[in-house]
């Protein structure tokens, strides 16, 4: 059940059965010479909707721009500042908690979002308390990265070993190939790929990772792999979502 | 050409030809008993992509949550605060101006966004100047509401006369029916519909407009009307975008 | 009744009779070679006080600096950023709502304020709710631009036709001439006046409108016209204020 | 020379002779049973204009709402939060420094503004440096309280001794009586007046100072005294302004 | 009793006896060629702990970076912006007021903190009210500068007369010598020392005060003087703290 | 070399040899019935100073209040909000980068700081770029948690196995016992300790972890263990700091 394809009356009805909401969050940033700029949002959205189907949960619209400041020296990349993303999360949750939701399950497609999201959750709990919202102390946020699902991680290692890398990975590229077969990009990738550097500012990042990849070989990706990753992530996160719902 | 389905290398190439970017912006808010909560984002996104196809312009991911605070007493509705939306716009444009974009064409699906977007544009011009970004003084933002296109407005009046209303309108509902025929909702609408009240806070709004409609009869909408509206909006806004690009 | 010339005891008494407050808001920005930099604040203040006299309403001190970022490449012009003006409005109203006021009627003298004020009203309703202020959901803000009064607009068209323009207009200059006959300025105006350009950042604005006028011929203004405009605006806005007070 | 009664061309010309600007700042807050709510803004504005006349300096519009949070439990009182006032000052000065001004002389009518203004000056110097404004490191702000002029203080002690008090003082009330003889208020003042309490939050303040006065007896004020105070303040601050201008 | 060396259970117990908390606040900024960068934090911390010992009060961790923007052109100096320091104070006090504390006694070691702290107190009272914290209107903050204790001031004048100066003073240097005898620095000080200039931005400050001293001769300091200052400050502030606690 | 015990001239000299700065950051929060509220700041500070001694690096004053919102339902605990901590970091680094520092090594004592610090680093890189600070793109921040040093972790597991837990751990308590033998606290700990719950808001946290411990048995700590942990952490982080300095 997708929030944007529902009416408020359907949501009112849903809230009598469940206070859970799944929120996909991705990023819009360079993913190497062949990866889609929307990779992280695309993966998070599709997997979140898959989880919603399996668990009969309501799925919110995707937060498609996240915290990707370090990628912004590559054209087309866009990012919120951490302080802005914190406000965005806090604005969203103030609305939804007032609606009656209390269990927020974020399905995340971008490693760079993790820290800011955790900070945002902490800030939001305090903001909800400030605002004297009923049941503010019942609100729970959970962060679930599809790419760190153990089943996903295991498959990526089997298929790609160290060529999985850590950005513009074949696994995430594979999922986008499965979902958008018409948008599979071809390019000759340099055989050498930068790897292992720490991440600082945007200009520094581009100096260190000149084509945008971080140790990955996305040429190994196939749509068939993508389906496998998608299925594993949906299965594992559906289980995680239900467990989260059932926890006090 | 969709930003999220492009690579950074394709964007780099695009920037040698054009500095224009189309940004769809909608809202996620109640649209009456039968309208989709995502109506404004759905319409803006589809029309923006249509305009992108016609004009070979790059289309950014949709800003799917806008300024809809007055709707937030209806469950599922969500909003950024104006001050947050201003930061979001300013964060986005700082990134894209640094990338080389300078002409931003916002295709908007929600009347409630208009004021905040205009405020955000003004603030962003100042912020870009503060940040000493090269060519900051060349940056231009344009706001284009699909629902105020003269061709759209004319058709809505012809088809629905005063029953078009001003929120949860048959015209916008029709566009969503055309785009999502499987999500057409049935419900008996009260024959009396509230109309003409001023808009203040969220609780007040729900008191005045108990089912969420503002003077509209969305039961008049059909998917066929939706296609007509879509076609008119794409045509008129494509012309407007090209004109904007060509202006100094 | 002017707030700044009243005592708190008089205000306490007033609040037993009315919860209405009139707030003049203008701007401090260039108005062409002959227009006063304070034009918008001067007009809004005088007309608001006139309305206060007619309706026995309390009139607040004038917000004399508004949102005029696009004029700030002309010396002497000054502006709040939209995000700052939103905070100013929200600070003011938090105080006055706690005092017992609930009906805020903004008499505005500057087109550039409109969007930010509307955004500020929306933000303020949310902030008041956050702060759990008693009767926050009864608070109402209304924006009334003296220059868009139908009677004013009609007279301006009769007197000046297309030479009214849209900034540094003869109608607003006339009102300042009526109010400050000693400050009528003489200068030879270029016969050609820039017109019809869109508004972006401050530097761009000055390039497009080199003397600051936007399509206007303020040389047509006379103090006598000014009195006519003043009288019409006071009459029409007094009616509007009373209507606002009486609405639930 | 008043900024709001000048044109931008006159300001451009003024800047060839001087980079100084006088900014009156007051407050809009209770001043006891007989003092005007606008007392602090009225006094600051009139004295600033007097100084402008004597020194041929440009005088900006009055900041008529300042930092008066502790007075806001008395109806009609209004205040900016310190953090908002800091933004207001920083917004103003960014505009005016870009115009070419660099010497800002604040004539202040309210003790409660002092700390926040000093904080605002410090913040503004940093913000101007961040924004890479030419000559940011030449910008100077000076705070001049009319009520702490030594000549004013001496006269107040002579006329009123300890009955001058520290808020709703006869000296400031006298100035308003001189300026607004038609707004002289009559009320029987309690013979006992609270005095010497520390200042904390607004509710606490009203508990401690039930009629709003702080140790003062404003019944001693006369318009003639007001003229004396006005003349002394104008003279002393004119001297201070010229000295400020001449300092490197 | 030091907060950082206590357990939460000890604090819970303390709160049954007292709602008072002593908060040392200093700065980390240049103190001339021989003064320690931490001078202000060192002095405030030691004196606050002395006061805590005498009065059996709980002493919080030291705020060791304050508002010292004007010193930041000297390497190693660091400052919060006033707006940030306001947020820091408001965050701290929100936590501690929710814990049950209501009397906050700030022992301050840096003149540059005074204005921002006063602004922060005012803002915090408002923020606590917004957050509907129980007993928010009982919260009291008191600012106590050790260097303006009358006994300290008197001794400094006796020992150093005009060579006390106003920054990098022998009195504060003496206290640090008493506390950190191993960190006494030797350097030849210029016989001429800048004095009496107003304070503006950081670059301007360093131009005016090239070695960082403001009219002082810290070569006069001795550890023995330091002990005297320390003892006087502890004695006088202990008295002030107890008086504060006992006031309603 | 401690920044607060240095002069600006010593820092200027240091900067000719190194651009590195070590910044200890802890927290001030409950650590169970026997752990010190200052545990995290105490450990971070001591270890950072140890690393400074070994590596001849400059060590900044400790940030002793961090992000510990979830602990604030226990009396005495205090926290910055994530958005405030981001501003604090960005203020600090703006000053120090302008001084000439570029390599910031944060030695952290609190798990709850990690996410916000990472967010703060990302935001700071962007802010430094906005402010056009020379060499902004050379700035590097590194986060080093003493408690996740592999040598520390290994010893903790050897000594305490699963009784190490994750908050108020015997290892951190041991370090404070080594450093403050006079502040070793005795209390009977419940034999059952809560463990494994997720972390949400402050009230929820206290419900789940009623005595503040998270799965730990701090009664196992001894000062001798503390010395071992301290030595290991200093050794491992000294190596890490030097490696960081030497990296481009």
Image (spheres, coloured by chain):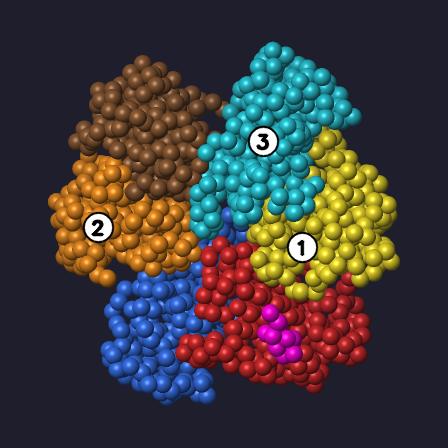
Chain colours: A cyan, B yellow, C red, D blue, E orange, F brown
Secondary structure under tag 1 reads loop
State whether residue D238 is above or below residue F122: below
Q: Chain of mark 1?
A: B
Mark 3 vs mark 1, CA separation in Å: 32 Å
Q: Quadrant of residue A29?
A: top right
Residue A98 is left or right of residue E192, and the answer is: right
Tag 2 residue: E18
Q: Is residue A228 visible?
A: yes
Give the spatial CA distance, label 2 vs label 1: 54 Å
- Residue corresponding to mark 3: A107
Residue under label 1, please give it: B211
Whether pointer 3 and pointer 1 mark residues with C-beta atoms closer than 8 Å, the reply is: no
Q: Are marks 2 and 1 in contact (CB under 8 Å)?
A: no
Residue C245 falls inside the magenta stretch: yes
Output the chain of dot 2. Answer: E
Mark 3 residue element = strand
Picture residue at 81% right of the left edge, 50% below the top: B221
Task: Name the spot of residue A163 as percent of width and height, x first.
Answer: 61, 14
Q: Which residues are magenta?
A: C237-248
Are the residues flagged by discs 3 and 2 from a single subunit?
Answer: no
Residue at 32%, 40% in the rendered image? F74
Work out whether residue E156 can be spotted.
no
Helix or strand or loop: what does disc 2 sit on?
Answer: loop
Closer-to-camera residue (A109/D87) = A109
x then y, percent, for residue D15: 56, 66
The residue sitting at 72% across, 22% down in the picture is A178
Q: Quadrant of the N terminus of chain F?
A: top left
Q: Is C82 one of the magenta-colored residues?
A: no
Task: Give the vertical position of E188 relative to D167 (above or below).
Answer: above
Return the x and y of residue F120 as percentages of the image width and height: 47, 37
Task: Give whichever of A232, C184 is nearer the camera.
Answer: A232
């Amino acid at each position: 059940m997708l929030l944007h394809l529902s009416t408020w009356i359907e949501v009112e009805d849903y809230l009598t059965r469940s206070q859970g909401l799944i929120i996909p969050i991705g990023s819009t940033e360079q993913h190497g010479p062949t990866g889609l700029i929307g990779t992280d949002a695309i993966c998070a959205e599709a997997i979140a909707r898959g989880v919603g189907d399996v668990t009969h949960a309501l799925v919110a619209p995707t937060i498609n721009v996240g915290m990707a400041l370090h990628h912004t020296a590559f054209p087309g990349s866009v990012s919120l500042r951490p302080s802005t993303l914190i406000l965005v999360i806090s604005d969203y949750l103030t609305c939804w908690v007032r609606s009656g939701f209390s269990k927020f399950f974020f399905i995340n497609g971008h490693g760079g979002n993790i820290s800011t999201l955790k900070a945002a959750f902490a800030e939001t709990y305090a903001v909800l308390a400030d605002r004297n919202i009923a049941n503010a102390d019942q609100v729970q946020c959970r962060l679930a990265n599809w790419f760190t699902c153990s089943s996903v991680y295991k498959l990526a290692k089997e298929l790609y070993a160290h060529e999985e890398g850590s950005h513009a990975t074949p696994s995430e590229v594979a999922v986008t190939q499965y979902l958008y077969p018409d948008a599979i990009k071809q390019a000759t990738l340099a055989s050498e790929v930068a790897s292992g550097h720490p991440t600082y500012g945007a200009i520094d990042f581009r100096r260190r990772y000149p084509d945008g990849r971080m140790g990955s070989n996305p040429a190994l990706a196939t749509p068939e792999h993508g389906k496998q990753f998608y299925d594993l992530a949906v299965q594992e996160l559906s289980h995680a979502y239900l467990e989260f719902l059932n926890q006090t």
